[in-house]
Image (cartoon, rainbow, N blue to C red):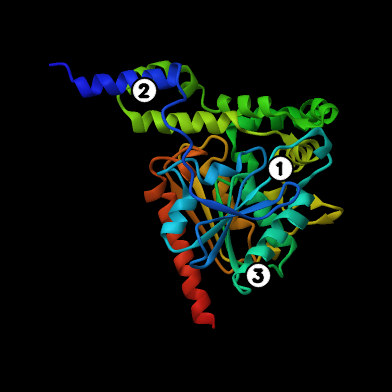
Amino acid sequence: MLDTRRLITSARNAWGLSFGDGIEGRRRTPSTLISEGPHRDLYRFGEIQGRPVLLVPPLAVPAYCYDLRPGQSLASHLVRGGHTPYALDYGTMQYTDRHMGFESWIDGIIPDAIRAVSELHDGTDVSVIGWSLGGTMTLLTASAHSDLPIASITAIGTPVDYTKIPTISPLRLIGGYTGDRPLTTATDLIGGLPAPLVQASYRVTAPQRELLKPWFIAKNLHNTETLARMESIDTFMADMPGYPGRAFRQICRQLILGNGLYKNTIVLGGRSIDLSELNVPVLAIGGTSDVIAPAASVAAIRSVLTGSPSVRFEEVPGSHLGIVAGPTSENSTWARIDSFLKDVTQQMVTAL
């Protein structure tokens, strides 16, 4: 017997994907602009109600990576858990930003945001969460500025040992002979890695998803929630901005080719950044199907943060984006974060 409701839903979804405005409009957690500046807008989700958490996005990723849509929002989850989350927004990168490197973030943008959030909470230490390169920049910031009011760091899908990332092995092999020139010559000329290339490179990491998308849509045409999740990811990838030239060059030279995080050889602004100087508790989370930051590359963090009072590694199901904003995140990644933040808070109270 024909299911009329299913047929109507399928027709509505087909129209939304083909000719309409999509499956659902953008639905985000209410937020307030706290402060603004070049590549450093700071937003607060909800009202001040509990201990502060600062969400640090990676470069070349929309700031709403922590708030894709209902059910895919770490920010909303933190609000429901009684925290007060804040998020940095770097905006888009232009040719005039080509000289911005990691120094701009670890010596300015991120420390300034941590201090601002702390001041809004009467000097309380801030728990910082960074996804992918957001975690990298947070770890470097805390190592370079041990006096910052940081309670803890959570690094989600943040690779530390780049030799354990199979997808970049060819680049490392070629780079061993040629240096970073094949990667950076063109980007130096145009001032960075433009958004279309960033978007294309992200799609390349999931070729099966792209190839099977028509079949996936046809199979799930009646399932509005599944299609809404797909749509949110497609929109997210289409909104990815580019990398500034200097930062992209540092990624190639010091992270990909030099494996500097694992070897502890990062040099920024003329001085070495020693990860052993990081002195706060750290939680690192790796995804079982993450090809951008495989779990083994993330787990290597345990051998470099020798000055941290505790370094915890957790492996969860999911891809690079899936571990932070996937359908299983609430019961995996977010649950691990909840437990970690609870432990950190208890330790702070005990220390008083």
Where does the image place residue 166, in percent across and percent down from the top left?
A: 58, 33
Which residue corresponds to mark 1?
Answer: 255
* Image quadrant where residue 200 sits: top right
* Image quadrant where residue 114 sits: bottom right
Label 1 vs label 3, nearer the camera: 3
Tell me which amino acid carries mark 2: Asn
Q: CA distance from mark 3 to mark 2?
A: 47 Å
Going 47% across and 42% down the picture, which residue do you hit?
Answer: 325
Tag 3 secondary structure: helix
The quarter of the picture where the N terminus appears is: top left
Q: CA distance from mark 1 to mark 3?
A: 33 Å
Left or right: 209 as drawn, with respect to 152: left
Tag 1 secondary structure: helix
10 Å crowding of disc 1: few (<14), some (14-19), many (20+): many
Q: Residue furthest bottom?
A: 352
Nearest to the observer: residue 51 or residue 18: 18
Which residue corresponds to mark 2?
Answer: 13
* Image quadrant where residue 204 sits: top right
Q: Which mark is residue 293?
A: none
Where does the image place residue 174, in percent across and percent down from the top left?
A: 74, 27
Nearest to the observer: residue 168 or residue 196: 196
Left or right: 77 as drawn, with respect to 218: right
